[in-house]
Amino acid sequence: MLDRTPDTAPVIDLDNPRDRQRKQEHPQPWSRIRTSRVPIWTVVLLSVSSALAGAAAMDAWAARQQLRSQSTQVSLFVSVAGIGSATQDGEADHVRIEGTLAIMNGGPLPIEVTNVSDDATVVLHTSHRIAAEATTWFPAQVTIPCMDTAAPASMMVALSVLTADHHHRATKVQLQLAGTLWHDVIARGCRRSRE
């Protein structure tokens, strides 16, 4: 059933200036912010600048991660570059060669090859910094063990490398002897040691 009597609850008339004054006397703190309008270009500008700043930060982070991983990489190639002299110690079963080794840095960053290694078969007379994808020649003394009466076709060379992150790293590289200037000299020296 419908009540035909009007509601007697107090009603605020928004058009009434006294009600508006009462509302303005006690404004809530966020009411001004909620009711103020921000131009759309300001919202767009803030959104685009935030997206660009985030993309730049991610790009910088990715570049730092890539540099960190590259600074620990060591990729060396060693080959025979020349011969100075070859000696054999009496009845010893090894040949000692004074010669030149070519060492190539195949890594993405410069490294420094030093002579701090536990392996006494290769002694580098100098240490050099090698740029990325560059080759440097090192005067070296190499002691090569004879295998039966034949010269070995290759040997492992242990080198110490100072990488871009300033850590010394030991690495082993295969040195091919077969087909080089040294191979015939080593073969003659190994045959003499067995006679």
Image (cartoon, rainbow, N blue to C red):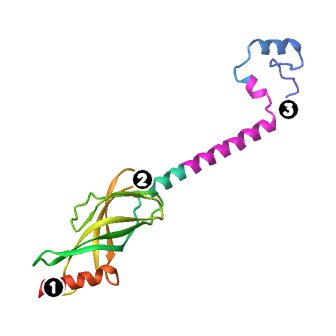
User: Looking at the picture, how far across and down is residue 165, in whole percent?
Assistant: 40, 51
State the residue position of label 1: 192
State the residue position of label 2: 164
In this picture, which residue range is highlighted in magenta?
Answer: 32-60
Name the front one of labels 1 and 3. Answer: 1
Q: Amino acid at mark 1?
A: Arg
Q: Tag 1's secondary structure?
A: helix
State the residue position of label 3: 2
Q: Quadrant of residue 33?
A: top right
Q: Nearer the viewer, residue 63 or 7?
A: 63
The image shows residue 6, relative to residue 53, as above or below, that is above
Counting residues from the start of the chain, the first of labels 3 and 2 encountered is 3
Question: Which part of the image, by quadrant, shows the N terminus?
Answer: top right
Question: Which part of the image, by quadrant, shows the C terminus?
Answer: bottom left
Q: CA distance from mark 3 to mark 2?
A: 89 Å
Q: Nearer the viewer, residue 134 or 87?
A: 87
Q: Amino acid at mark 2?
A: Ala
Counting residues from the start of the chain, the first of labels 2 and 1 encountered is 2
- Can residue 151 be spotted in the picture? no
Q: Tag 2's secondary structure?
A: loop
Majority secondary structure of the magenta segment?
helix
In the figure, is residue 54 to the left or right of 163?
right
Identify the residue shown where x is 32% and y is 83%. Answer: 178
